[in-house]
Amino acid sequence: DAKTTQPPSMDCAEGRAANLPCNHSTISGNEYVYWYRQIHSQGPQYIIHGLKNNETNEMASLIITEDRKSSTLILPHATLRDTAVYYCILGGNKLVFGAGTILRVKS
Amino acid sequence: SQTIHQWPATLVQPVGSPLSLECTVEGTSNPNLYWYRQAAGRGLQLLFYSVGIGQISSEVPQNLSASRPQDRQFILSSKKLLLSDSGFYLCASTEGRETQYFGPGTRLLVL
């Protein structure tokens, strides 16, 4: 069973920031939070991961709450090509994918 | 960075026929390798993972098997396919701390 909870779907206007929440209240001390996305008919793509501190890369930012029980993935300027299913996953040797959030970016 | 190859890209097989899907990895050594399946409209399900040559762990009881004859080669097989084996099969490899990179996948349709 997935150990994270995400909303089933979200809409975002093109050019605006997309903020995707994830709850992981049972996270253990050494588990990383990973985000992947899957564009239709393709394999999942790694986006970002973090342990405690906020992280940023060329794709997105990851904000992790101080108690580590939730996190938010931020796509700063969403484009139509960011429409995908976004998965929040707790790290381990075996990733458990939940249902994810379907993000629809609309013009 | 590593590259993951999977073939074939699509496959249509009759029920009861055998299956062999191959995954090879370039640009890394001694990776952990994974086979996932995604049924239509569903999430990814981990089927097998391997931490080394000849070492296979199965996550769910099923009609499939996996083998790792070489460090960067992972094979998914079946002796007799079932209708329920249809799906999108993805091979993944780890680089660094648990970051998984996925191949392009194989779409299998069992008729």
Image: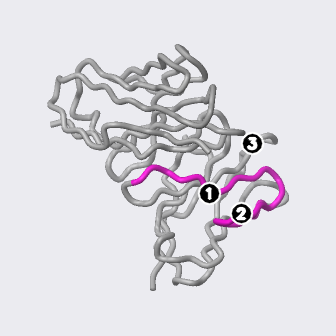
Question: Of callouts 1 and 2, which one flags the residue occurring earlier in the amino acid sequence?
Answer: 1
In the rendered view of the protein, which quadrant contains the C terminus of chain B?
Answer: top left
Report the residue at 57% width, 84% height from top: A15
Q: To which chain does the residue with label 2 belong?
A: A
**Which contiguous range is marked in magenta?**
A42-64
**Does residue B37 sit above or below B62 in this rendering?**
below
Disc 2 designates what residue?
A57
Q: Amino acid at mark 1?
A: Ile
Q: Are marks 1 and 2 in contact (CB under 8 Å)?
A: yes
Residue B13 spot, x, y in % from top left: 18, 33
Q: Is residue B110 left or right of residue B103?
A: left
Residue A87 spot, x, y in % from top left: 56, 55
Relative to the observer, which residue lies in front, B49 or B73?
Answer: B73
Q: CA distance from mark 1 to mark 3?
A: 17 Å
Dot 1: element? strand
Q: CA distance from mark 1 to mark 2?
A: 8 Å
Report the residue at 52% width, 56% height from top: A100
Q: Is residue A93 left or right of residue A11?
A: right
Disc 1 designates what residue?
A47
Magenta segment includes A61: yes
Q: Amino acid at mark 2?
A: Asn
Q: Amino acid at mark 3?
A: Glu
Q: To which chain does the residue with label 3 belong?
A: A
Foreground label between 3 and 2 = 2
**Does residue A91 sit above or below A60 in this rendering?**
above
Dot 2: element? loop
Co-location on one chain, circles 1 and 3: yes
Relative to the observer, which residue lies in front, B47 or B67?
Answer: B67
